Amino acid sequence: MRAIIDRDGPGGGDYSLFESGAILMYLADKTGQLLPADPAARSTAIQWLMLQVGDVGPMKHFVARRDQPRMGAALDNFVEDANRLMEVLDQRLAESLYLGGSDFTIADIATYPWCQNPEKRGIRHEDYPNLKRWFDQVSSQPAVVKADGIANRLRAGSLSAG
């Protein structure tokens, strides 16, 4: 379970949050960044965030376990659904620069990690050209490059994220 403690939360005290979608929405509201102020644009970004939280994340989690024989026939269903979700994302990105619209939002932040290493999930970026364009665009954002570098150092065994 993802969780944070904001040491400068509402009223200046500690404020605990859990679940990635709720954390992202809280931080976007607190900073006034990564979530549009316009109600329609904001709602669009939140809808795509909810697709990641409720569908893309869980589906890809199961598909990543495809090497476990006990999954059996259920795995075919998960792989089919994962590809259907990639098609939904690809269609959205055919009409929009980012998932939430013309600006990079928390919907992109939440979805991006689930689109890394697609081969582990039985998916090929080449089958989804708009998703591939978006992925390349997001992966080149300075903050994403920095975060990916930190994650890679941590995976390599470094205890320092700095």
Image: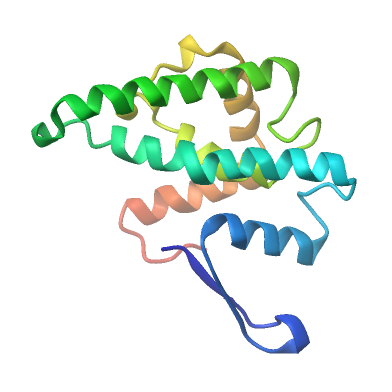
Please say which color scheme the image uses: rainbow
Compared to 2, does 17 lie above or below? below
Judge from the rendering whether residue 20 lies leftward or rightward of residue 32; answer left or right.
Answer: left
Name the spot of residue 92 as percent of width and height, x first: 66, 22
Judge from the rendering whether residue 7 lies leftward or rightward of residue 128; answer left or right.
Answer: right
Residue at (68, 89) in percent of width and height: 13
Q: From this viewpoint, is residue 122 visible?
A: no
Name the spot of residue 75 as percent of width and height, x first: 23, 28
Q: From this viewpoint, is residue 38 visible?
A: yes
Indicate the quadrant where residue 134 lies: top right
Judge from the rendering whether residue 148 lies leftward or rightward of residue 45; answer left or right.
Answer: left
Residue at (62, 43) in percent of width and height: 49
Indicate the quadrant where residue 160 lies: bottom left
Q: Residue furthest left?
A: 69
Name the spot of residue 33 as percent of width and height, x first: 80, 54
Residue at (75, 22) in percent of width and height: 96
Residue at (70, 80) in percent of width and height: 9
Number of numbered markers: 0
Compared to 25, does 138 lie above or below? above
Q: Residue furthest right?
A: 38
Name the spot of residue 10 as percent of width and height, x first: 74, 82
What quarter of the picture does the N terminus occupy?
bottom left
Indicate the quadrant where residue 104 lies: top right
Judging depth in this view, the residue of 135 and 66 nearest the camera is 66
